[in-house]
Image (cartoon, grey):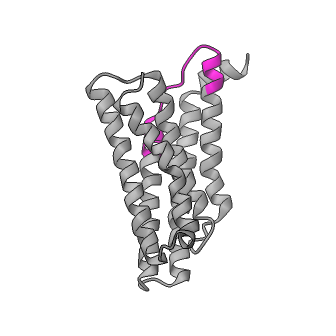
Amino acid sequence: MLNVAHALTLFRLFISPLFSILYLGYSNVGMPLSWVPYCLLGLLLLSELSDFYDGFWARKHRRVTDLGKVLDPMADSLTHLTLFLSFTQGVIALPLLIVLIFLYRDFLVSTLRTLCALKGFALAARKSGKIKAVVQGACLVCIIICFALYTADRLSLQELQTASCLLVVITAGYTLFSLVDYLVANRDYLRRAIGG
């Protein structure tokens, strides 16, 4: 049965497409560009707060479930990837090749977890992976703030794009570190899973 934590996680999954709709289709809904960063920021903060609260609720009420362990990181990844991929378009124009690092990292970790689960053992989450989610969320908040400054004529287009690119490069660097940390920490399990 669904509990409060599951409901909040599903809420994050369902609102993820709104990021792309707001950023890429704001003119189709009659929204001025100057409103877009504030709507995106509000939506992102709502998503991040619900992420914090669902984990807090599950631990407080001792309702940590296998379903929650699967859905929660998936909701994090979907939210962050939706924004990063959306930001490769439009005025922010993040480099797609750098953003793909986030996609490939999550895909690889998910595949390895599934493979190990099929072999009968679970891979534990790493602290570096949790920090990675926080770093990605902070990066997105900073990019959106730069976007707001651009719409208020406080930053030029080039300054917006340069700052956003620098932020995402730093975040991609930590994302790669978290992948290496995950692979090294679980190398024995991975060797058993891949080796048959």
Percent coordinates x, y for residue 86 in the rendering: 59, 61
- Range of residues picked out in magenta: 114-132
Q: State the residue in front, 134 or 87.
A: 87
Residue located 40% across and 49% down the image? 47
Residue located 36% across and 44% down the image? 50
Residue 128 colored in magenta in the image = yes
Percent coordinates x, y for residue 2 in the rendering: 41, 26
User: Does residue 159 appear anywhere in the picture?
Assistant: yes
Q: State the residue in front, 35 or 123.
A: 35
Image position of 106 with respect to 88: above or below: above
User: Does residue 173 appear anywhere in the picture?
Assistant: no
177 left or right of 127 in image: right
39 left or right of 113 in image: left
114 left or right of 162 in image: right
Residue located 59% across and 41% down the image? 106
Percent coordinates x, y for residue 169 in the rendering: 56, 61
Image position of 179 with respect to 67: above or below: below
Quadrant, the N terminus: top left
